[in-house]
Image: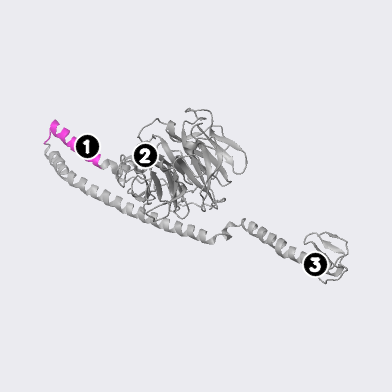
Amino acid sequence: MAAVNDSRLCSICNKPSARCFCIGCQNYFCSKDFKEHEQQLSMKFDSEIVSSHDELLGQIQKLEKSNSLALDLFDQIEQWKRATINKVEKAAEKAHHQLIEVIEKQRITIIKQLEPITKEIHYRREEDNFIENDIDRLRKKLNEIQQMLKPFIEKDATKSVIADNDQIDWNQVIYIRAERQQQPNSPVLLNGDLNVNTKWIQHGITVAGINGRGTEVSQLCNPWGLYLDDDQTIYIADCSNHRIMEWKRGATTGRVVAGGNGPGNRADQLNCPTDVIIDKERDAFIICDYENKRVVRWPRQNGTNGETIISNVGCWGLTMDDNECLYIVDYDKHEVRRYRMGKRQETVVAGGKGPGNRLNQLYQPTYVFVDRDHSVYVSDSNNNRVMKWMEGTKQGIVVAGNQGEGNSLTQLSNPFGIVVDLLGTVYVGDNGNHRIMRWPQGATQGSVIVGGNGYGNQSNQLFCPIGLSFDKEGNLYVNDEGNHRVQKFNIGRY
């Protein structure tokens, strides 16, 4: 604490002998009160700073003795271990008894078949009553019985009586994951409990657009992008109605929250919006206004007009990372660019080398997802593949498709909406095949998780799905564009 001499009233005793000035609190003190003020500051520094520092240091040092931390988790792991060992022992004991039963049953069968042969051999030996044909016939019977016995006496053949086990992914049976705080604008990342075997109920529930195609607030017309808020409120880029719709959980009608004044380029209009997200820091929607070649920010609270924040861009899809960087898919320029909000700074993070199918190119990309490592996943629509561009790299890697357009499990047809979970599994709207596909990390083929039953409007069918998202429970939401509805597929409880 610094002091300067002056002649003012003391802020404590109010005497005119105040010659000391505290730069920190901007008050004058007499010499006596100034010393007391110094002592108080010293005590405050020790209690609030030094003690907090020492406490923090002590907590860090405890990390060296990890067994003293999170004791309940260690107990859970130990309980799981004991329970699992118990189950494995019971399963092994059961298999042991089953093997004994199989062997005993086969032994009895063999003995019964061998008894008449044994009697015949003894008879013919005692009577010397046999010819070449008898020898050949008996040898053949003995060989047949020998083949029946073979699986039980030869080591490599014993597998024929052991049931094959299902493969176990021991990395996923039990594991520890440090939870990271969800940033306000980061994409929803799926529950870590999801895995490649997770299933969804195949019959979806219509949660928006329940009255078919139209312009009423209970209807949609070609819904494209989809954003799902934490409370399961759905925000839909209602493309052909030139508006953004809000649909509360359980509601039968929606509400127009942006646009809805016909197609146009005025500040209160949109023209074929293709995607929407929420910038929670600024409490605003950010909208891909595709036909107007602009990105619009629209206030969430009583917003009647939007503000163009990026112009001259063929924006089709967008997302935001935890650093408040905005990622824009430029469908027309075949690239993805990153913008720092509030700054005139943009960087091409995927594509940008013209249309093509090389690993450093994209061809009419549509939607984008950014993970916590800031890797960019892009639906490379006209190349029928999904690409991953790790931060700072000059080319991408294929994570789904790239086997030409088709409907096999190794192929995609015009992929659109995309989400990636914590395990790196890609979920993509396979538009032309009317299905949602799951591609585990490193897989050479995907699997159909919903749809795939031909195009149609039944509850187990989709018609050109586009946007998709998951809630925190893992339930799947799909913009079923051709049916002008949003379908919810509940996660299976198996």
Q: Is residue 135 magenta?
A: yes
Q: Amino acid at mark 1?
A: Asn
Closer-to-camera residue (451/60): 451
Tag 1 or tag 2, which sits nearer the N-term? 1
Element type where label 2 sits in the image? loop
Give x and y (percent) for residue 431: 38, 38
**Secondary structure of the magenta portion, mostly?**
helix
Q: Residues within 10 Å of mark 2 (few under 14, many from 20)?
A: many
Image position of 479 with respect to 335: above or below: below
The disc placed on residue 37 is 3
Task: Measure the alpha-carbon separation of dots 1 and 3.
Answer: 107 Å
Q: Is residue 34 left or right of residue 316?
A: right
Tag 3 or tag 2, which sits nearer the N-term? 3
Magenta stretch? 129-148
Closer-to-camera residue (374/154): 374
Q: Amino acid at mark 2?
A: Cys
Residue pictured at 55% horizontal, 41% vertical: 308
Q: Which residue is mark 1?
A: 143
The disc placed on residue 76 is none
Tag 3 or tag 1, which sits nearer the N-term? 3
Closer-to-camera residue (123/452): 452
Q: Which residue is mark 2?
A: 464
Image position of 42 with respect to 480: above or below: below
Residue pictured at 40% horizontal, 58% vertical: 86
Q: Quadrant of residue 156?
A: top left
Q: Quadrant of residue 67?
A: bottom right
Element type where label 3 sits in the image? helix
Q: Is residue 374 magenta?
A: no
Q: Residues within 10 Å of mark 1 (few under 14, many from 20)?
A: few
Task: Measure the alpha-carbon separation of dots 2 and 1.
Answer: 62 Å
* Residue 369 appears in view: no
